[in-house]
Amino acid sequence: MRITQEALAHDAGTSSSYLSAIENGRSSPTLKAMERLAKALGVNAVYLLSRRISISIVSDDELEIGAILARPAVTLRRHPHKPTGRPSKTK
C-alpha cells in the first residue's frame, strides 16, 4: 500500500507529526490510535498489531511520478494494438 503520511494522518484523524513519532519509535500509539490507523488502512487492529504489513510512506511528488509512469502501461494494456505515439524502428 502506498499512501502519504499526511493522507494517512487525515484518514486516521491524527497528525502527521504523531505518525512520524510512532514510525521512528519516539512514541507508542494508544489502542484508540491503533484502531483509527487500522480503519484508515482497511484492516482490523488485531491484524495491524499481529502482522508485518508493507506500508510505504511516500511524498505527494512520488505518488504523482508513480501515477505518471504507470499511464503508458495502462494505456498499452487497454489498447494493445493502438499506436503509442513513439516512432517505430524500421530499417
Image (cartoon, helix red, strand yellow):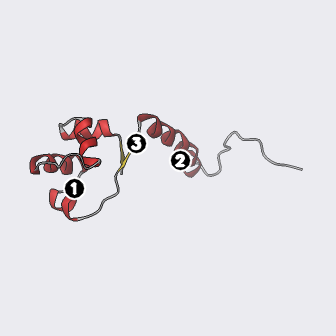
Say whether marks 1 and 2 touch (CB < 8 Å).
Answer: no
Q: Is residue 36 left or right of residue 68?
A: left
At numbered mark 3, what does the secondary structure look like: helix, strand or loop? Answer: loop
In the figure, residue 43 lies in which quadrant? Answer: bottom left
- Answer with left or right where residue 17 lies relative to residue 44: right
Which sits in the foreground, 31 or 42? 31
The first of marks 2 and 3 along the sequence is 3
Residue at the spot 30% in from the left edge and 37% down from the top edge:
7
At horizontal 29% and vertical 62% (from top left) the residue drawn is 52
In the figure, is residue 73 to the left or right of 12?
A: right
Disc 1 on helix, strand or loop?
loop
Farthest-out residue, right: 91
Q: Residues within 10 Å of mark 1 (few under 14, many from 20)?
A: few
Gap between marks 2 and 3 measured at Cα: 22 Å
Q: In which quadrant of the rendered view does residue 8 lie?
A: top left
Task: Give the residue type that dot 1 points to.
Answer: Val
Question: What amino acid is labelled 2 in the image?
Answer: Val
Q: Earlier in the sequence, mark 1 or mark 3?
A: 1
Query: Under tag 2, what secondary structure?
Result: helix
What's the residue at 40%, 42% (across, down)?
58
Residue that carries the numbered disc 3 in the rendered image:
58
Q: Which residue is mark 1?
A: 43
Residue 24, image x, y percentages: 29, 47
Between discs 1 and 2, the one toward the N terminus: 1
Q: Nearer the viewer, mark 1 or mark 2?
A: 1
Classify 12 as above or below 31.
Answer: above
Q: Is residue 50 above or below residue 67?
A: below
The residue tagged 2 is 74
Is residue 51 toward the left or the right of residue 55 in the image?
Answer: left
Alpha-carbon distance for marks 1 and 2? Answer: 28 Å
